[in-house]
Amino acid sequence: MKSIKYWITLAIILPMLLTVLRCGGIMDADEPGNLVPLTVEEDLSLPSISINGTLLHAETFGNQNDPLLVIIHGGPGTDYRSMLNCSDFANDGFYVVFYDQRGSGLSQRPKNPNYTPQLFIDDLDAVISHFHKSVDQKIFLYGHSWGAMLAAAYIDQNLDAISGVILTEPGGFTWEDTEAYINRWRKIEFFDETTNDLVYLDQFITADSDEMLDYKASLVNTDHLVGNVGPTPFWRMGARCNQKTIEYAMEHGFDFTTNLHQYVTKVLFGYSELNNAYGQKHAEKVSSAFPNFELVEIKGTGHDIPYFGWENFYPLAKAYLNELK
């Protein structure tokens, strides 16, 4: 009798192995749209903005004259789909902006990517400038996971620009703290089911295109390692973005805390109840880079707080934003 793993893996690769004929040709796994959703460069019907020479998938909710709230997703390499609950803030009088970072989600894949922290900071600055309507319009940030790290990095360089910031489970604001957190949760055993399936799949899928790499990345599910009760939704993974960003950090490190002690506005810093790799101790260490912060535990959720923990997180975030609005 065939194992469950065999049937699951067969179900994944069967559509490719059948090589469905299209007009007398064979379906190409590297052809855009066959394995993963099209990017904004390939599907012009998707909402997008041009930022620093790159097309980014982006959309907004609310009145453009209300205080600006920029939502910064995690990763590097995921997208904002799991954070769409934040569109509720539009009903609270905020102009809510979502964007997929370069090389991530449905945004354009650069041809010769060189992913550095400064590049992401510059992109965020350009996104803010694109949607900011007047000098009197306040700017708020909500960053989750890697997005929270990016938000802190931006504030470190722009202390007077941001009227308030919400951060949920940033890995760390230095590479040392981030690496320690990663090492606690990224503990996939070599012979577990996920790894075995990917090794088996590599017999059939070995190309190095963005489409193939993103597809393979979508098969890796480590949600259980960070306390999530199920899979987190996404449109498309940015595998090369993730790989190159982490490689840069491993080689060069980073420290986003140089000026954070000068940011006196209160920061709302949230961590989840169910992510055992994070916990209160790590939250206290990371949040202490700011002189003024409110540390809150979000009950009933793992790492992906804006998706699984929205019911408990939203009232806290709303109260914080309204206080500074």
Image: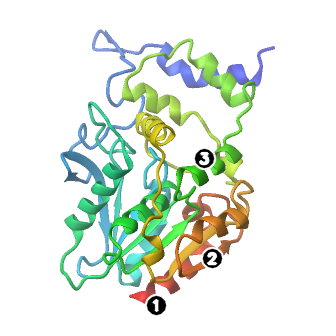
In this view, 159 is above or below 38: below
Residue 310 can be seen, yes or no: no
Name the residue carrying label 1: 323
**Residue reaching furthest to the front:** 258
* Mark-to-mark CA distance, 3 and 2: 22 Å
Q: Mark 2 belongs to which amino acid? A: Leu
**Can you say which quadrant of the picture contains the C terminus?**
bottom left
In front: 293, or 53? 293
The residue where tag 2 is placed is: 295
* Side (left or right) of 129 relative to 217: left
The mark that comes first in sequence, 2 or 1, is 2
The answer to which of marks 3 and 2 sits earlier in the sequence is 3
Residue 203: give x, y in percent of width and height.
56, 12
Residue, far right? 1
Q: Do the residues labelled 1 and 3 touch (CB within 8 Å)?
A: no
Q: Name the residue under label 3.
A: 179
Label 3 close to label 2 by CB (< 8 Å):
no
Find the distance from the CA under tag 1 to the CA under tag 3.
34 Å
Relative height, residue 198 to residue 84 (above, below) = above
Q: Say what amino acid the circle numbered 3 marks.
A: Glu
- As helix, strand or loop, the secondary structure at mark 2 comes to strand
Give the side of residue 217 with respect to residue 295, left or right.
Answer: left
Camera-near label (1 vs 3) is 3
Residue 302 falls in image quadrant: bottom right
For label 1, count other residues whose C-alpha is less than 10 Å away and answer few (under 14), some (14-19) or many (20+): few
